[in-house]
Image: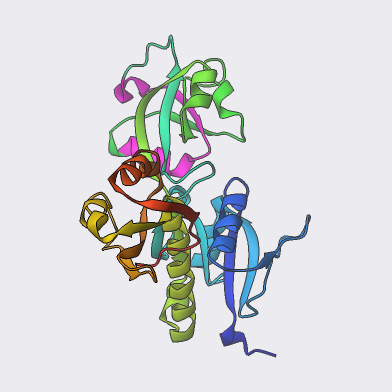
């Protein structure tokens, strides 16, 4: 049996972030088993005990010390005004690797054009506490109603405006809504209980997890390229390679030939490979990466 001090209690977000978070952990090298109805994913690393918690509640449980650490959105930390230690920002969301936005939205034909026009209006949102504080800071008095879901359908009959989360804006457009203003930009954060963060063993464990998660995220947008190049073409080929530092160059058994290995942004591959081929590279192989640790 491990002593309780050698266990890290980790909160994983249940809901929209669940699948992307589990995928990220697995890419980082953690083997996790999740049964259909269980709220307790099992890590192969027996020093980690985890629980699925709604992202909206995560910061409160971490602040209170029920969990040592957890992953949640910056929006829900702000909503609860939680007193936690932010270990790292991890730029991923439900559908991609970009931050999400909380926006004020109104029907396309609404007379509300600016945030000042919200005075005396009714607003529906899940982000009640933060919205109330935000509007107060702008000297705007409005009635804020908690929304239990399907927030986009509430204007104009149940609310004059909404404060809603969006990644692409497609759902808002589909419901004939337009954005008036962005009130908060949010990304996933790895947070820690302040007392747990002072524990040397737990802190090291958390820092190791974050390093591997960041490495897995960095690899999402990069690929590796291997290629063979002759000595006479080497300088020209290398001039095309935007390496993180510099490419790895190894001499091949065939006299005058080299193997180049480099990590590049995936979005540049389609344009780069034809240029490399034209410059004299051959045997070009593109391969996926699991982690990139700077």
Q: Looking at the image, which residue is at 77% across and 60% down?
A: 35
Q: Looking at the image, which residue is at 33% across and 16% down?
A: 113
Q: Does residue 81 appear in the picture of this structure?
A: no
Please state which of residues 222 and 101 is positioned toward the viewer in this rendering: 222
Instruction: Name which quarter of the figure residue 174 lies in.
Output: top right
Q: 31 left or right of 241?
A: right
Instruction: Name which quarter of the figure residue 118 lies in.
Output: top left
Across and down, in percent, residue 100 comes to 43, 41
Please state which of residues 271 and 208 is positioned toward the viewer in this rendering: 271
Q: 55 left or right of 74?
A: right
Q: Tell me the quadrant of the picture where the N terminus can be found.
A: bottom right
Please state which of residues 266 and 125 is positioned toward the viewer in this rendering: 266
Across and down, in percent, residue 188 comes to 46, 53
Q: Residue furthest front?
A: 255
Q: Looking at the image, which residue is at 44% across and 53% down?
A: 283
Q: Which residues are magenta?
A: 114-136
Q: Is residue 120 magenta?
A: yes
In the displayed structure, would residue 256 be above or below residue 57? Answer: below
Across and down, in percent, residue 3 comes to 63, 90
Across and down, in percent, residue 71 comes to 51, 59
In the displayed structure, would residue 208 be above or below residue 167? Answer: below
Q: Looking at the image, which residue is at 41% across and 55% down?
A: 225
Q: Residue furthest top?
A: 109
The colour scheme is: rainbow
Q: Is residue 289 magenta?
A: no
């Amino acid at each position: 049996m491990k002593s309780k001090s050698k266990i890290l209690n980790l909160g994983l977000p249940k809901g929209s972030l669940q699948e992307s978070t589990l995928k990220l952990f697995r890419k980082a090298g953690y083997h996790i088993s999740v049964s259909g109805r269980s709220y307790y994913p099992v890590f192969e690393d027996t020093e980690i005990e985890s629980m699925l918690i709604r992202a909206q509640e995560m910061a409160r449980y971490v602040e209170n010390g029920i969990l040592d650490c957890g992953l949640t959105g910056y929006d829900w930390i702000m909503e609860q005004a939680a007193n936690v230690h932010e270990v790292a920002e991890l730029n991923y969301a439900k559908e991609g690797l970009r931050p999400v936005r909380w926006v004020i939205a109104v029907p396309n034909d609404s007379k509300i054009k600016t945030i000042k026009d919200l005075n005396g209006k009714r607003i529906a949102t899940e982000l009640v506490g933060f919205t109330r504080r935000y509007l107060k800071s702008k000297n705007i008095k409005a009635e804020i109603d908690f929304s239990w879901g399907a927030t986009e359908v509430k204007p104009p009959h149940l609310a004059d405006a909404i404060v809603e989360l969006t990644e692409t804006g497609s759902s808002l457009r589909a419901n004939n809504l337009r954005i008036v203003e962005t009130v908060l930009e949010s990304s996933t954060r790895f947070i820690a209980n302040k007392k747990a963060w002072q524990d040397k063993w737990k802190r090291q464990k958390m820092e190791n997890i974050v390093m591997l998660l960041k490495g897995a995220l960095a690899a999402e947008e990069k690929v590796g390229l291997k290629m063979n190049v002759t000595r006479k073409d080497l300088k020209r080929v290398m001039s095309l390679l935007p390496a993180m530092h510099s490419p790895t160059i190894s001499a091949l058994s065939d006299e005058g030939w080299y193997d180049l290995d480099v990590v590049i942004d995936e979005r540049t591959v389609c344009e780069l490979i034809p240029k490399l081929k034209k410059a004299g590279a051959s045997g070009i192989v593109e391969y996926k990466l699991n982690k990139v640790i700077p």
